[in-house]
Image (spheres, grey):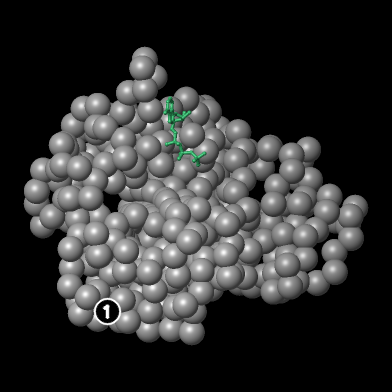
Amino acid sequence: MSSVELRDFVKLYGDFVAIKGIDLDVEKGEFCVFVGPSGCGKSTLLRMIAGLETISHGDLTIGGRQVNDVPSRERGIAMVFQSYALYPHMTVRENLGFGLKISGRSEEEIETRRSEAATMLGLDPYMDRRPSELSGGQRQRVAIGRAMVREPEVFLFDEPLSNLDAKLRNQTRVEIKRLQQQLGATVIFVTHDQIEAMTLADKIVVLKDGRIAQTGTPLDVFERPQNQFVAGFIGAPSMNFLPGEVISRDGTGVIRALGIDIPVDPSAFHLPPEGTPVTVGVRPEDIVPEGHGQRPELGTDVEGRVNFAEMLGNESLIFLDVAGTELVSRMQQPRMVSPGEAMALRINGARVHLFDHQTEDSLR
Ligand code: ATP
């Protein structure tokens, strides 16, 4: 049984259709991440599930119960916001217990749940402090603790890590994942950060303009993007896209892009007739500098000239001019690279993606 089911979900703001008919099942115990660019509808969707926005059309089921018209506090959900939304005049102890207190729980039950959450989240030393006396990361843990003590059926997170610095963000991300696994909790998590989505999710829902562009495991959306949008959005740096043309569909297939013939496995694609324009997608790690890593068997050699390089420590990103177009290559074993330097590269034909030139759908 799904923990959360959305059926034909629509949100209208006046004439504007913000959510355009979404169907989705989030399973019990699943970590589901909504990801997409600004304005794609992530927060609206989450707020509709939370009961903070009305549902213009469609059905929402939580734990097998249709809850379209059930008030937020009775939906069995708990929400954690980017802004923490803690009560500033209350201590951590009071913040953690407040929700339970107003729902009429006994002092004893409040204390049990509160101390469990505080211990799990490492909040014991801070119980008598007010939010203003805590760091951003500690405040976020209190916000998570406040959601935990309610023992909800579903946790909803709205960009909870955005206000934290990079190091704390990574640390809190790991904590949230660990906690979710310990609790076996059902989580719906909104972010615009594809790395957060990839590392946290069991199921990623990539949204674009109020519609689902693709749903799948992190590996699915990375390895088998169904369209050019998902291919470009997931993966950093972005996939390189090149205008191409089908040259041959027989034997070893051939796609020509930038005047370069790239061999591909024709059985892996629904290749259109020879002469049809297609868009070729190549991830930076599949443009392999000579002598770096394994030489791709199916592939083609090209020459590039370095525009500039970004050294990241354990790897480098090399921006190269190849036949007048800038491509990004990921160099796994970094060495010093100078602008203007000529570099031999091999495009890995076995990992090339192809998209319909017009619909932008994958040709796989
Ligand atoms: P962000 O990452 O920037 O927060 P988002 O993906 O969460 O973006 P939403 O906040 O869900 O996007 O907004 C989706 C669309 O609905 C946007 O085009 C936004 O302008 C519009 N929208 C959101 N709230 C309202 C509102 N109250 N009235 C009218 N339009 C709205």
Q: Give the residue displayed 26% in from the left and 41% down from the top.
A: 51
Q: Give the residue displayed 39% in from the left and 57% down from the top.
A: 80
Q: State the image quarter where residue 111 is shown.
A: bottom left
Per the image, label 1 sits on a secondary structure element best described as helix
Tell me the kind of residue under disc 1: Glu
> In screen coordinates, is 341 left or right of 151?
right
* Camera sees residue 83: yes
Task: Name the quarter where the N terminus is drawn.
Answer: bottom left
Q: Nearer the viewer, residue 191 or 69?
A: 69
Q: Nearer the viewer, residue 87 or 249?
A: 87
Task: Name the quarter where the C terminus is drawn.
Answer: top left
Q: Give the residue displayed 66% in from the left and 42% down from the top.
A: 260
Q: Is 191 above or below relative to 51?
A: below
* Camera sees residue 286: no
> In screen coordinates, is 13 left or right of 9?
right
Ligand 1: which quarter?
top left
Residue 266 horizontal/vertical position (percent) = 42, 46
- Which residue is tagged 1? 111
